Image (spheres, rainbow, N blue to C red):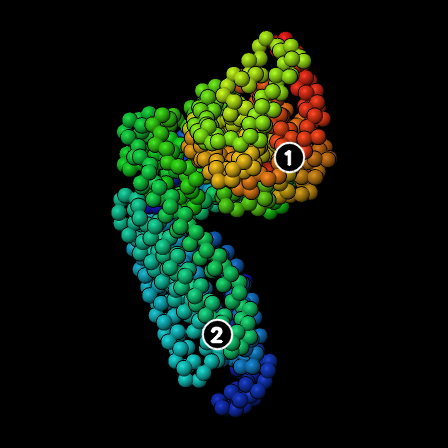
Amino acid sequence: MAGSALRRLMAEYKQLTLDPPEGIVAGPISEDNFFEWEALIAGPEGTCFEGGVFPARLVFPPDYPLSPPKMKFTCDMFHPNIFADGRVCISILHAPGDDPMGYELSAERWSPVQSVEKILLSVVSMLAEPNDESGANVDAAIMWRERREEFNAIARRLVRKTLGLPP
Amino acid sequence: MQLLLSSICMALTSAVIGNAYYQKQQFYPAVVYITKSNASMAVIYIQFFVIVFMFGKLLRKIFLGTLRAAEFEHLLERFWYALTETCLAFTVFRDDFNPRFVALFTVLLFLKSFHWLAEERVDFMERSPVLGWLFHIRVGSLLTLLGILDYVLLIHAYNSTLVRGPTVQLVFGFEYAILLTVIASTAIKYVLHAAEMRTDTPWENKAVFLLYTELVIGLIKVVLYILFVVIMAKIYALPMFVFRPMFFTIRNFRKALNDVIMSRRAIRNMNTLYPDATPEELRQSDNICIICREDMINHSKKLPCGHIFHTTCLRSWFQRQQTCPTCRLNILRTPAVISTAMPRAGDEAAAAAAGNAAPDAAGAQPAGGLPVPAPAAGVDGNQARANGPLLAGQALPPSFADLFGDANGLPNLARLSVPPPPVMPMLSPFMMPPQFGYFSPMPPPPIPLDLTKFTDEELRAMEGHQREQIEQRLKLLQNINLMLDSAGIMMSQYQTLASRLQLTAVPPASAAAPSVEGAAGSGVYDKPSTSATAMAQLEAHQVTPTATAPVAPPLPAEKVTIEDLGADADEDDVPSTATEAVSLPNSDADFEENSSELGELRKRRLKFLEERNRFANEHTQAE
């Protein structure tokens, strides 16, 4: 009997394959290891990330779903809630105990009720509406708040880059 | 790259050895030549490390096969930390720094890295779908080998310390003891995982065993570290190099201890208080445990909030957090209410309902939070029961009676000067027994909200960041504010009463205070809630230093709160209660002032009452 984490990940994979949400593709990188997933996220329409396809990697802890997975974009990203190395900083990915930024309510934190699908959907909405109070990338947050045009230009350049187009 | 480096190293070594032979022709002089030459020795040392590295690779191939990316990453990370700590350790033992010493540390690091790898492998067991017999043989033999090596080296360090007194072997002995605990916990984990794999059903107690293993091993480690630091500090210097691992060990131990305590409580609650979900409830819900996403056929429990989960899933979650996974109700702080009224609908349905229910909840809440006539009467009744006999059975001294007359006469005068409005029956104190002239029929504090009785929708309406949810929360806070205000007003009345009683007869006063408090505490607030406890504290705080100092609440503030309360309570009560409350501190003051000032005060009071009545008049006419 495999571990409960594995069974749950398999169930989620099945669910995501049978009924994929719009703009999101996700699955294990290899079927040998269900604890590392790759996800492709389409930039939400009507935002500066529109048209882009952003690859990300999800790493699940052995005690998933009791602990949240870690998520990291594997392409260049410039966004207030994404660290320069691609790590995503949203409250749904933080366990209720720890609070890296010290402002999150426990109601928005990780709980076993959450799922890969919900995480990815929150990431999509994070792309659409950055939270400029959590400074994972302070430069991006300031630029988003004060020089939106510049921010949009960088985002559009990133979109072209993910599509393999010349900037 | 590695191949290139090792071949370069190999070439260098052969060059050095070849050169020595070429120059000295014989074995012994050649060896002497090499050991005398620093450059040659450097090459030999490097070759030594390369050989150790290659040996490590060989062992890894045998026992572990190829490393996963994560394993390699963790290994590198821990290796650098360990290397730094080793260098720090060198500073303590700089006196006996020699090649043998370096070799011993190399062996230690070498073994350590295999311990880490074994740990990682065993952790990996839980997440891999299939494991062949090769895996078990490898892990089994690796654990055995490492355990034996640790034990032998520990015994060696122990013996050499006994024979030669404290040397650097102390450090090694300690390190191997720690490694032995690591091996022990890894082996226990391995056995647990392997046992679970053999069965087809999830093993309920595994998580508990794991938790206790962690606790016990953590305790042993903490004891070892503390012993080591104490011994080292006595013999050598403070061992800086163990501070980092010691810090992490202590933190982990604390966490494990906390987890054990909290989860024990939560799990005990779960086993004893929460009902098993009935088949009917399971049928009503979507029958899937939201934690593991599997059907709930066997044991499942229903939390006080109505959400149903597998017993096993809940148990492992309670080891992390003692909240409901769905609605985050803190189950340790919630008295177990066996709620049958709230079968859980499907999650989506509930979420959808939350939106619709928000306005309903908004409507329902003030009704629950503010005084409704029935409980108000109940409170009055309580007061009457508590205070009536006390006052009635008491022989009132003349001064007291005088005061009564004074207080009762006042509204009379007011009535003479200002024609009373038709709808103000409460204005005349004669309508009730004279003792109660001092107990203004204030609207009693609203019944505190019993949070456990909230429905799911109401609770959900207060979660989140949407505007309506924030409004809900604000409303609740306002209700609490109202309760506190009214509690304060009641308090000031109790105080006037207490001071009066004390002035007239001391013993009854001391009896009065607890009885009043008791009535308020037991009669209405049978459910513990924050506002009730706050009130109790307030009471306790204000009653005990019995009121020799008259507390006159600021009038304007009082007026506002009373009117706030009155808006939802009986309209007719408002003016009269206000006047009563106002007249109380004044009459109290009267008693303490000498009689020459009485007239002056009376005039002032009259004027005030006049204003009040006019205001009330306008108010009722506006109605």
The one nearer the camera, B460 or B209, is: B460
Mark 1: few/some/many CA within 10 Å (<14, 14-19, 20+):
few
The one nearer the camera, B526 or B481, is: B526
Mark closer to the chain start, 2 or 1: 2
- Rounded to the nearest angstrom, the CA distance separating label 2 from label 1 is 72 Å
Task: Give the quarter of the figure containing the C terminus of chain A.
Answer: top right
Tell me the kind of residue under disc 2. Answer: Ile
Q: Residue at x 57, y 25 (%)?
A: B404
From the viewer's perspective, is residue B512 above or below residue B363?
below
Task: Evaluate whether residue B85 shows in this view.
Answer: yes
Query: Where does residue B590 sit, x and y in percent of width and height?
Result: 65, 30
Task: Give the quarter of the figure containing the N terminus of chain A.
Answer: top left
Please identify the quarter of the rendering in which residue B24 is found: bottom right
Query: Where does residue B262 sit, x and y in percent of width and height?
Result: 41, 47
The residue carrying mark 2 is B231
Task: Evaluate whether residue A116 shows in this view.
Answer: no
The residue carrying mark 1 is B592
Q: Residue at x 48, y 19 (%)?
A: B373
Tell me the kind of residue under disc 1. Answer: Glu
Q: Nearer the viewer, mark 2 or mark 1?
A: 1
Chain to which the residue tagged by mark 1 belongs: B
Q: Residue at x 50, y 74 (%)?
A: B232
From the viewer's perspective, is residue B225 above or below residue A60?
below
The one nearer the camera, B396 or A70, is: B396
Q: Are marks 2 and 1 on the same chain?
A: yes
| SS of the residue under disc 1 | helix
